[in-house]
Amino acid sequence: MRITADRTRCVGSGLCAERLPDVFDQDDDALVLLCADEVPAGLRQDVEEAVQRCPTEALSLDADAPEH
């Protein structure tokens, strides 16, 4: 399952990076950066929750992408 981030929608709330620092980070402008393109093993539920909680819907998951 692939993670995508639309940095043009990101407002830098940091909820994702705070909850999952191994998957999400923030740049100097506090915009989301991906540390992983695919959902790491064992973190699917946490990543799905981070995607759902994103206040600007800047994060999404591609269920058709293979999961490793």
Image (spheres, grey):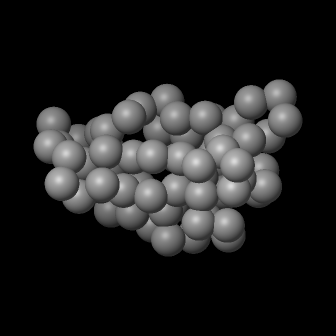
Give the side of residue 35 with respect to residue 29, left or right. Answer: left
**Residue 64 locus on image (x, y percent):** 18, 54
Give the side of residue 3 with respect to residue 65, left or right. Answer: right
* Residue drawn at (33%, 62%) of the image: 45
Q: Residue furthest front?
A: 8
**Residue 34 locus on image (x, y percent):** 52, 35
* Residue drawn at (23%, 58%) of the image: 63
Give the side of residue 23 with respect to residue 30, left or right. Answer: left
**Residue 52 locus on image (x, y percent):** 50, 71
Give the side of residue 57 with respect to residue 67, left or right. Answer: right
Relative depth, front residue between 65 and 14: 65
Q: Is residue 48 above or below residue 43?
A: below
* Residue drawn at (47%, 38%) of the image: 23
* Residue drawn at (60%, 58%) of the image: 58
Q: Quadrant of the C terminus?
A: top left
**Residue 46 locus on image (x, y percent):** 40, 58
Give the total of numbered labels.
Answer: 0
Q: Is residue 67 above or below residue 15?
A: above
Q: Is residue 21 visible?
A: no
Q: Is residue 56 visible?
A: yes
